[in-house]
Amino acid sequence: APRNPITDVLPSPDDGDGLGLDQVSPVITEENYEQKQQPLKIVWQNVFIQLGIHLAALYGLIRIPWSHPLTWLWTIFYYVFTAVGITAGAHRLWSHRSYTFLKTFTVSCLVMNSAALQNDILEWTRDHRVHHKYSETDADPHNARRGFFFSHIGWLLVRKHPDVARKGKQLDLSDLYADKVVMMQRRYYRLSIVIMCFLVPTAVPYYFWGESFQNAFFISSILRYVLTLNATWLVNSAAHMWGNRPYDKNINPAQNRGVAFSAVGEGFHNYHHTFPHDYGTSEFGWHLNVTTAFIDFFAMLGQVSDRRKISHDTVERRRARTGDGS
Ligand code: ST9
Ligand code: ZN
Ligand code: ZN
């Protein structure tokens, strides 16, 4: 079986169903994890950048009625394009290794990932693996116990809790350091985001249907970027708070259909934290899950193999044992 980058490093307790380590982290509660809050160290540069791009996005929103309908279509297309770079790329491929790939597919994931501008793949993946292993503790970069604002955007505006790096350094990231595609992106990250997150989305409407520079930049680049950021952050905030918990009622991550829709398939978060190496991050195939359709499409073209899927039986047994009955 392919290795699981999270559980193979530090063993998690077998949860007793005789099926091996299907749960990544032990459920961490107040009793077995001591919270050690630190005073906040605000990073003002990030505060100003986020304020700036959110205001600019608002301006883009106001400009929509005065822009070309093709610009709207392009913006929606580019939203999905960059979102999939995060979901199929950074998340399901590089963080969880839930499927395997061929080179062309990886390179397209990389390009889409740079377009999303959510830190390079190495940094994103490192934070995400530590998020799964130490969910809702100080070692979780966006610990949802610190409230909606912190888990949504606040965590990007302050220095990390020292536990994040401390625990993160115990993870095995050798697969990423050995991954030429990941390391190449890290080397040319700045250049790649300038081109893919700002230049390309602005240039296409401007050159191909004569959109004004202003509209192209504020709508297709900035507004679209800010929307994808917030859709992503909702997985950490909303989907760690609101929704039902049919697979494991003892953890915060929940099934949230609104989030699944805006995050192109990543809102079935109770399922995902219970079965993190399922490539579909949900029981329901393509339902509200563009990402799974995307991976399946590339599988059809022979670019993807070894899609890891949890069997229906395993899911049912787990649901009966730890679900909330919904
Ligand atoms: C963004 C990312 O938005 C969003 C990710 C969300 C994840 C969601 C997951 C949900 C599931 C998937 C759903 C996808 C849905 C997609 C839908 C799309 C529509 N392990 O970080 P530094 C060490 S990014 C091990 O600077 P500070 C390491 O040595 C937005 N070690 O910490 C590191 O040095 P180096 C754009 C770790 O100084 C050193 O510590 N980007 C780990 O406390 C320093 O690390 C921004 O806005 C670890 N986990 O600063 C940038 N972490 O890197 C924001 C750290 O050299 N970031 N170390 O190895 C920053 O400015 C800073 O990181 C900071 C903290 C101020 C937040
Ligand atoms: Zn989560
Ligand atoms: Zn995950």
Image (tube, rainbow, N blue to C red):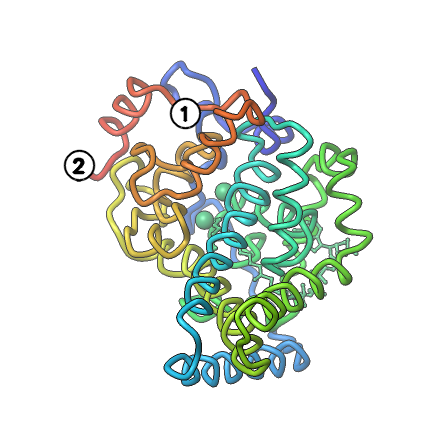
At x 49%, y 24%, the residue is: 307
Relative height, residue 217 to residue 257 (above, below): below
Quarter of the picture holding the C terminus: top left
Residue 23 position by quadrant: top left
Q: Quadrant of the N terminus?
A: top right
Q: Position of residue 153 (x, y in %)?
A: 51, 69
Q: Can residue 167 be seen by looking at this rendering? A: no
**Eyeballing the image, is 278 above or below 251?**
above
Residue 186 in the figure: left or right of residue 149: right
Q: Which residue is mark 1?
A: 15
Q: Is residue 111 visible?
A: yes
Please state which of residues 61 and 91 is positioned toward the viewer in this rendering: 61
- For discs 2 and 1, the disc positioned in front in the rendered view: 2
Q: State which image quarter holds ligand 1.
A: bottom right
Q: Position of residue 47 (x, y in %)?
A: 60, 80
On the image, the x and y values in percent for residue 48 come to 62, 83
Relative horizontal placement of residue 246, taking residue 185 as reference (left or right)? left
Q: Which residue is mark 2?
A: 325
Amino acid type, mark 1: Asp
Mark pair 2, 1: CA separation: 19 Å
For label 2, the SS is loop
Q: Nearer the viewer, residue 31 or 118?
A: 118
> Under tag 1, what secondary structure?
loop
In the image, residue 239 sits, relative to residue 149, either above or below, namely: above
Q: Residues within 10 Å of mark 1 (few under 14, many from 20)?
A: some
- Spot occupied by residue 89 in the image (x, y as percentages of width and height): 58, 42
Kindly identify the amino acid type of the residue bearing the numbered disc 2. Answer: Gly
Pick out the residue farthest to the left.
326
